[in-house]
Each structure stands twice: as structure tokens, then as C-alpha cells.
Amino acid sequence: MPGRVFEEVVLPHIDAAFNYARWLTKSDADAEDVVQDATVRALRFFSSLRNEDARAWLLTIVRNTWYARFSKPSSADQHVLLEETDERPDERLDPEALAMQRQAIERVQRALGELPVDFREVIVLRELEGLSYKEIAAVIGIPIGTVMSRLARGRERLLAVLAPQATGGGRELF
Amino acid sequence: MNCSDVDGVLDAYGDHELGPEEAANVRAHLDECSACRDQVAARAALAHLIRRVPYYSAPDRLRVAVATARRPARVPPRVLALAAMVIVAVSLGGTTVIRTVRARQTASATTAAAREVVGDHVRALMGAHLFDVRSTDQHTVKPWFLGKLDFSPPVLDLAPLGFPLVGGRVDSIGGRAVAALVYQRRLHTINLFVWPASDSSEAPTDSRSVRGFQVRHWTRDGMAFWAVSDLNDLELEQFVAALNR
């Protein structure tokens, strides 16, 4: 991207990079290390960034950095629940409904954290970053069909955890 | 399509990743099949919840690391700025030249100031010098500036509104001593720079993004205000609104 300055391209996506790293590592400190390393790599590869989407490009580097450092399974498989109170509850709901929604969000967060990372990351990239299947495939380096099947299986697991007594539906609990 | 066909593409359907024809086929099946409709609804409800789990924002340290990572730019920014000015000048008609020149001078002064306050924000976060006075009490911070500045900056604690004051310092912007008030929002730092405005007219809020940081500038009661943060747009707007209540 001739004429563009590194920080102007990367800074707008630094939250996305950190959020992804945080969901991959489940640790603030590890996520910060990964993103720190990733930005050093990104700077080195910056001249190779052409016209593709900078966010997907940065997320790919974050993913590769994480993979190189942390891919050994269960290095830090515990997590802290809702240590940041950043959830965005619906303002239209009454207090009781809000409390129920907050509980549901906490359950989803916990369940998502407990999913195997293969499922977890596709859901994070899809739902929190809004990436297309094609972009997710590029970030992770897997075929689009695999993105689709991981999303399907990940969501089924979440639904099963969240609505054990509901058969097939699941709306009752939300 | 039958239920098992639809079951295989439920996620792609909900994610709008199907082609128009296939999506229409799924819709046709859903019109007739309440079991599959429930599946779609369950996924939509799940997506709704997932999007509300905490979004982990990057700590300021990372932003600073990126903002200060350097490699030489191929074209010096000054040349780019000059080129932009030439383009602006060329693209404007002759009759408005004088007004444009003045507007451009104001605009370029504003741009220079924006760059300076962002540079100062970054340096302060790098640990060089964030606080001269560290206090959450506006009645401690305001008198602290007495005698250190030739004006008295308004100091408001916005803790009840979610933006606690954490301290202040004296800084130098464009060669003049200015007040820098430090506010916090979760892990994010907001630097609010205040100095006497060069002209007394009230200016509406100027919003811009410099090096990935959000910048808001306005003039009120003879004071120029600059708020700089890595907060998102919306929250910095809230901060500005809270200050101007």
C-alpha cells in the first residue's frame, strides 16, 4: 500500500487483533505478547500488503504468531469470567429481563471459552469480527468448507450446552 | 429441499453465505417447516448473545507500540501535505481564493495542533510523563495549576458519568504551556488539553482521527479543548457531551 503509513493501517484494527488473540490465548498477558510480536512481524511484512483488507491481513499475522508460540494444546486453558464488564446489554429490557440476559451472556461466554480452539476461533471471527467465510478461511489457512463445518459444529455445541433441556429449539432459554 | 438438505446449510444460510437461488430454496422450505424455522431461530438467538460477550480492547501499551513503530516512509509526509495543498489550491476557483487561503490556514493550524496533541498523548502514555498531580479530586487538581499556568482551566470530575478524573500535568503545545487533564475509561486513557483560544468565537466540535487515535476539538468560553484517546468514536462523543453538559 504505497504512501500509507504503518500505524494508520494497523492501529484501527488493534482492538480486533487483541480481541482475537485474547480469545485464542484466554489470557490478557499472552494476548498482549502475541499482538506485540505480531505487530513487529506486521511491520516487517508491511510492504507486502497490497490492496487486501488490512484487518484480515493483521488477523492472519496474529494467528500465525499465536500458532508459532502457543499451539501446544492447553497451555492456559483456564479463564476468568467477565473480568471486564464490557457487555452491552439491551437498554430496552426491564431490570429482570436484563439480569436474565446478562446471565445468558455469561453462560455463552463461558461456553465459548470452553470450546476447543478450532471451533472457538471461527465463531469469534464470524460473530465478533464479522468476517466472511472466505476471509476466515484465509486467516486460519483452511478451506471454506472446513470453516462452514467448524462453525456448524461449534454452534451446535454451544446450543447443546446452553439449552440442554430444549430439544431442537433453544429459544426458551434466551 | 427437505429437512436434511436444509440442515446442511443452516449456518451458511444464517450467515448470508448462500447464493440467492439456494437461499430462496431454503426460505421456501422454512415457510413450510416449523422445526427448521426453530433451528434458524435458535442460531439467531445464539448469535445475538455471542455478539454481547465482552470485546477485549487492546491496552494502550499496544497502541503506543504500534504508533511508535517506525520505518522510513517512502515519501516524506511534508511532501504529501504540500502536494495535497497544491491539489486543493488548483481545484478551487479564483473568486474564493482569499477565503480559501484563510480557511486553509485555520485548517492547517488545526491539523498541526491535532498532530501535536496526539504526539503528546502518545509520549505521555509511554510513561514519560502522564501526571504531575495525581488525584481524582477536582478540588485538588484545579488549584494545583494555580501559578503554573497563565490561565485557570476548568476541571470537572466525570466519575459519575463513567469517566473518572485521574490527574493532570502541565504540557507544552506549540510552544505554550497548556493544561493536560487525564481521564480514564476502563483501560483507556483520555488526555484533555486545555488552553486559551486564539479567537473567542465558539467553534463546533471538530472530529478527526490521527494515527489511529480519536481526536475531538472544540472551543468554549474562550478556551480551546482537545480530547485525545484510543476510545471508540461513540465513547469519546459521550465524554465530550459529558464535559459540555
Image (cartoon, coloured by chain):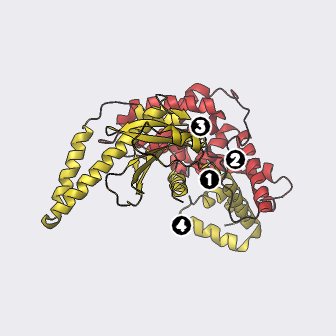
Chain colours: A red, B yellow
The residue to which callout 2 is attached is: A154
Residue plotted at (46% across, 28% down): B128
Query: Are circles 2 and 1 on residues that touch, CB within 8 Å?
Result: no
Q: Chain of mark 3?
A: B
Query: Are circles 1 and 4 on residues that touch, CB within 8 Å?
Result: no
The residue to which callout 4 is attached is: B20
Category of crowding for the residue at label 3, using alpha-carbon neighbours closer than 10 angstroms: few (below 14), some (14–19), many (at least 20)? some
Q: Are labels 3 and 4 on one chain?
A: yes
The residue to which callout 3 is attached is: B135
Amino acid type indicated by mark 1: Leu
Amino acid type indicated by mark 2: Gly
User: Mark 3 or mark 4, which has the lower sequence index?
Assistant: 4
Q: Chain of mark 2?
A: A
Amino acid type indicated by mark 3: Ser
Query: Are circles 4 and 2 on residues that touch, CB within 8 Å?
Result: no
Residue plotted at (67% across, 56% down): B47
